[in-house]
Amino acid sequence: MMPVRRSSDRPRPAGLLPCLGFLLALAVPQVARAQAAAAPVPAPAPAGEAAPEPPPAPPATTPPTAPAPTPAAAPEHAPAEDAEGPEHGKKGKKHKRHALALELIEKDAPQADERGEQSKGDKHGKREKDRSDKHELLLKGRLFTLAEVSHRNETVVASGGGLETRDRNALDLELQSARFGVNYRSPLRFLSAQLEFDVASKPLVKDAFIEVGKTFFVKAGQFKVLSSTFELESPWTLPLVRRGLVHDLMTDWLDIAGRRPGVAVGYRGGKGGIRPRLTLGAFQGTVLKEVLPGDRDVMLIDHASLKAQTYAARAEISPGPVKLGAWYEHRVGALTAVEFSHFETFGVDAELNVAFEKSALRAWVDGTAGESLYVTDDKPGSDPYPWFAAGRALVGYRFGGMALGEPYVEPFGFLALMDPDTEVVSDLVTEAAVGVAAGYWDRLRVTLQGEITDAKRNFPNGFLANQSPEHSSLLLQAGARF
């Protein structure tokens, strides 16, 4: 008796083989696509030459027991060779592989670019975050020592109680300046501050202010009154050993320029063009504290008046290497410890800084005019406040020093004139200096300078408290900066 076979136990070659063929037909195109994606895209053939044909894909193997699928069982993804013949099939495969590779490249490229941009964005964001959280502190300082051999006329009290004039020769060694300071820049890029003090004799605050803004700015604290570029320039920048007699007469005796507590508002232009700048300020005035022969000391006006301020303005443009400026000061001045008045003062100036391949030319020129506090004793008329006029010129030519710390030599010359009263004759003050500075640019310098001053017979006695302004000196200065 034959065993009974269930329908599930009987072999079905007629139904199984078409299924295997269908699966193989699906697998072959997938393998071809994977090979095309992994293979590099062939470079285009030169013009006039036939493009080389890619090697034919290895034929798909089928189990030996499975017959080839019938045409009716071929899927719609069958290779183009079956539909268009051998030649067209190879070209079709080649074009399909190229298209598939380009499709994969285009599909992946945006993702890579997106990842790259995201990475750049992350880095940029990190930099912005680091910058926004960064406090910048810059410590700075400079030191000047001076040796002076001088010959001058001085007025002293004689043994009989009267005044007499005598010649004096002297050698003086001094610590001219010892300044230290710090510049601060806030994470808020428009906010900065500066503190600088001098400890050469006793701690003395020089600059201490806060500045807010870049293009439009506000500045408050203690800083230099708006005036000539020669006065606003740092003594380290000027090649001179000191600013000279005319500077002393204007700042110490006429209360022009100098440092005061105050507030200023202004505008500074961009880096291109003429770079305009305009600043307006109000500064606390001073009254007389003490007068000694050759020296005048003042103190700030405190709780005295609503009119105790000096008002000043300065405008400048910088076309190329030249800076042109004009300024005005409605200044407070005093001859006593309790009374003060306002005096008009104004000036114009120019600064030149031209760099060549291995040298540089620098120059400062200014002119100042205004009302004076001092009158010649025998001046006729009733005008209590005469007008003065002054002019200065400093020129230096530097050899070397084109980079920080580079050796240099800079000879220079200086000339200054002052007429204490434009209505009086024979009262002119003259000053001249020549010298040479050498060292390592902006780091270390030694300056040798000779200077001479002279005053005519009608020079007002109020200046220098009856001390003669005439002298001649040979100066040797050493300075360092960090």
Image: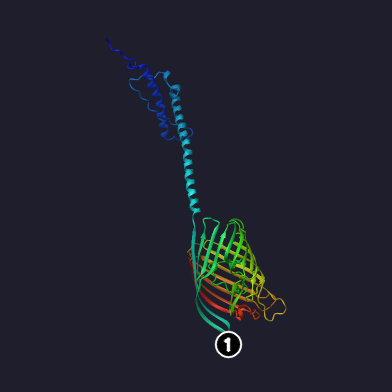
In the depicted view, which residue is nearer to us: 200 or 106? 200
In the depicted view, which residue is nearer to us: 98 or 191? 191
Tell me if residue 227 can be seen.
Answer: no
Query: In the rendered view, would you say 319 is above or below 472?
Result: above
Residue type beneath disc 1? Ala
Callout 1 secondary element:
loop
In the depicted view, which residue is nearer to us: 447 or 112? 112
**Residue drawn 38% across and 21% down?**
19
Residue 202's x, y, as percent? Answer: 51, 73
Q: Quadrant of the N terminus?
A: top left
Task: Say which residue label 1 marks.
Answer: 158
**Residue drawn 49% across and 58% down?**
136
Q: Give the colour scheme of this rendering.
A: rainbow
In the depicted view, which residue is nearer to us: 208 or 337? 337
**Residue drawn 40% across and 18% down?**
70
Residue 175's x, y, as percent? Answer: 49, 74
Mark 1 crowd level (few <14, some 14–19, many ≥20, 10 Å Cα): few
Count of picture labels: 1
